[in-house]
Amino acid sequence: MFYDETDIGEIIKQYDIVKVISKSVQLIKIGKKYFGKCPLHNDEAESFMVDPETQKFCCFGCSCGGNVINFIMYFHHTSFLRALKMLDSNVKYRKNIGNQERNRILEVNETVSKIYQEQRGEAAAAEYIKKRGLSDETIEKFGIGYSFPKGQKLYDLLKAHGYSDKEIMAAKIVGFYDNNYIQDKFYDRLMFPIQNVEGNVIGFGGRILTDSKDQPKYINSSESQIYNKSYNLFGLNFAKDSKQDYFIACEGYMDVISLHQYDFTNAVASLGTALTKQQISLLSTYKKKIYLAYDSDAPGVVAAKRAISIIGDLMEIKLIDMNPYKDPDEFLKALGTEEYQKRIDSASSPDEWVLKQLGNDALRNSANADAIRTELLEMLY
């Protein structure tokens, strides 16, 4: 079941956030607001506040906040859609048109993914895929493809499949500009379909085939009616079914793909951004442990530091040391599966990791090393 924004707004209006949260948290009214101990972290200061006027909650201790659906997500460690369904047991509002539009956009994305896959035999893409050492099985598993050179060939093919301009525009896969100028958003890139937990293609990531500095290495789909990067993770549709009791969280598509190829099928990545609370809540519905495998350079250290603060008490955290290699892809190609498993087995707790980073050569040589080091030290106290 899909819900459009109007559906969600109507659902939220039917539930008093104070009454919903009061079932799980003892609240005391002070003035016009309600306060209590935050159920999302070990709170002794009663830093949790609910505002009946705005129908929002926030915690001044762990920085969680949002509407009634967000509270259910955090409290029950569940996804946005599941939280919506938990709240939405007796809602009368349903707009089939919203569901039909979303289903049509999913169809557009599935068609685009197939078109891209049909193009991956093109010389530039085939050469890059070979250079990255991707197996045929891995390529098929992740639906890796190639986008056409600059132009509107994808648009023309989608029109030939019977999709309207409105549907193509809603999928955010083609740019429509003044003077009837149309341009495929992705061109001359290796394409990675982004799938939700059900395996539906909801967006795309595209990587340039060279090391050119004239354009971004990766570009990603814009958010749409079916794609919100804060609530999804690349590879989760596979990783959730892994027999391992933990996730490996990486920075990028190729790290996840490489880990899966080397039999670490529990790897996921956030989508062009740092981990979010929503992503952690989603992950924690499947497993209670997370191993961070972020790049060993200064930006990777900063990203890992932020991830630790976001994860908090929601999941048990370990951090994988990949030095002297930058990322999982480089490490695995150099040393293989057994050595990477050893790094997992010897992964550090957050405090141990902080102490190691203080001696990290990559961090020491970065432009903002002193500021990062100060922030790391603050994590210990």
Image (cartoon, helix red, strand yellow):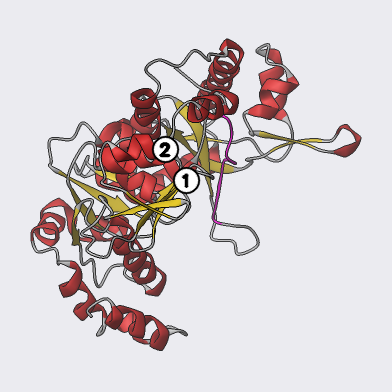
Is the residue under label 1 in contact with that under label 2 (CB below 8 Å)?
Answer: yes
Residue 351, percent from left and from top: 18, 73
> Would you say residue 316 sits in the magenta stretch?
no
Mark 2 belongs to which amino acid?
Ile
Write down the residue under mark 1.
56
Q: Main secondary structure of the magenta part?
A: loop
Q: Secondary structure at mark 2?
A: helix
Image quarter for residue 186? Answer: top right
Q: How many C-alpha atoms fall within 10 Å of the one at disc 2: few (<14), some, or many (≥20)?
A: many
Taking depth in this image into account, of 145 and 322 the one nearest to the observer is 322
Please report the residue visible at 20 percent of the width from the left and 78 percent of the height from the top: 356
> Would you say residue 223 sits in the magenta stretch?
yes
> Which image quadrant: the C terminus?
bottom left
Please report the residue visible at 9 percent of the width from the left and 59 percent of the height from the top: 342
Image quarter for residue 347? Answer: bottom left
Residue 242, percent from left and from top: 18, 35
Can residue 157 be seen by looking at this rendering?
no
Q: Earlier in the sequence, mark 2 or mark 1?
A: 2
Write down the residue under mark 2.
17
Does residue 11 appear left or right of residue 364 in this picture?
Answer: right
> Which image quadrant: the N terminus?
top left
Taking depth in this image into account, of 68 and 193 the one nearest to the observer is 68
Question: Range of the magenta residues?
Answer: 217-225
Can residue 254 be seen by looking at this rendering?
yes
Please report the residue visible at 28 percent of the width from the left and 54 percent of the height from the top: 38
Does residue 57 appear left or right of residue 106 in this picture?
Answer: left
Outermost residue, right side = 179
